[in-house]
Image (spheres, helix red, strand yellow):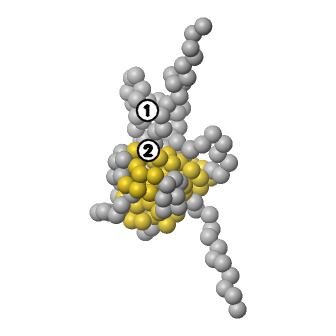
């Protein structure tokens, strides 16, 4: 009897995927690319038009993360998953939930630790550096040591944070 091989049907994690098989906490909005170079799994900020977005971060707040759509035509044959998002093209933007992202540098991380985001490119980092800001609403989901260039899951939340009441 032949051995069933399932790896042909499952891909390793790639940037910009919803994380998990039972995503019940995902707030996904439609946005429009206001610049070329926006790609899956990158942080975006408000653009200049209604629902328009640009790569990067405003202040320390990530507006959303570009989600991957497998219905889009790949840029290469055979497909390597590369897709070029065109100017003014609609893109799904995750504003609340878990997603996969490439961590450019590496290092030890802890669950709940805030993530550094490049304010220009929208890429994610463990440590501080040039153009990087500590995002107030994006955190790591695990306790582990990541090698540089690893894909892991992160949590973004844009839910309103209500401060605890002050005792009289």
In primary-sequence order, the first of circles 1 and 2 is: 1
The reply, left or right, for residue 155 in relation to residue 127 is: right
Q: Nearer the viewer, residue 67 or 151?
A: 151
The reply, left or right, for residue 46 in relation to residue 29 is: left
Question: What residue lies at 40% left-to-right and 38% top-to-bottom?
Answer: 84
Name the residue beneath numbered marker 2. 151
Given contact means CB atoms under 8 Å apart, are the residues at marks 1 and 2 in contact?
Answer: no
Q: Which mark is residue 91?
A: none
Whether residue 38 is situated above or below residue 109 in the rendered picture: above
Question: What residue lies at 44% left-to-right and 57% top-to-bottom?
Answer: 109
Looking at the rendered structure, the secondary structure element under dot 1 is loop
Structural crowding at the residue carrying mark 2, measured as other residues with C-alpha within 10 Å and reported as few (<14), some (14–19) or many (≥20): some
In the image, farthest residue toward the left: 130
Question: What residue lies at 54% left-to-right and 32% top-to-bottom?
Answer: 71
Residue 38 in view, yes or no: no
Looking at the rendered structure, the secondary structure element under dot 2 is strand
Residue 124 location (% of width, % of height): 40, 54
In the image, farthest residue toward the top: 1
Name the residue beneath numbered marker 1. 81
Q: Nearer the viewer, residue 134 or 92?
A: 134
Residue 19: quadrant of the picture = top right
Q: Nearer the viewer, residue 168 or 25?
A: 168
Residue 70 in view, yes or no: yes
- Quadrant location of the C terminus in the rendered image: bottom right
Whether residue 60 is situated above or below residue 77 in the rendered picture: below
Measure the C-alpha gap from mark 1 to mark 2: 15 Å
Structural crowding at the residue carrying mark 1, measured as other residues with C-alpha within 10 Å and reported as few (<14), some (14–19) or many (≥20): some
Question: What residue lies at 63% left-to-right and 39% top-to-bottom?
Answer: 21
């Amino acid at each position: 009897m032949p051995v069933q091989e399932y790896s042909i049907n499952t891909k390793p994690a790639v940037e910009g995927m919803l994380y998990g098989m039972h995503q019940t906490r995902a707030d996904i909005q439609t946005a429009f690319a206001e610049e070329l170079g926006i790609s899956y799994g990158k942080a975006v900020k408000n653009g200049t038009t209604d629902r328009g977005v640009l790569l990067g971060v405003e202040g320390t707040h990530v507006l959303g993360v570009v989600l991957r759509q497998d219905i889009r035509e790949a840029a290469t044959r055979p497909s390597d998953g590369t897709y070029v998002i065109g100017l003014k093209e609609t893109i799904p933007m995750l504003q609340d939930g878990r997603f996969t992202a490439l961590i450019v540098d590496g290092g030890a991380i802890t669950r709940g630790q805030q993530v550094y985001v490049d304010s220009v490119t929208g890429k994610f980092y463990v440590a501080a550096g040039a153009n990087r800001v500590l995002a107030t609403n994006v955190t790591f989901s695990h306790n582990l040591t990541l090698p540089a260039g690893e894909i892991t899951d992160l949590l973004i939340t844009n839910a309103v944070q209500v401060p605890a009441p002050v005792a009289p």
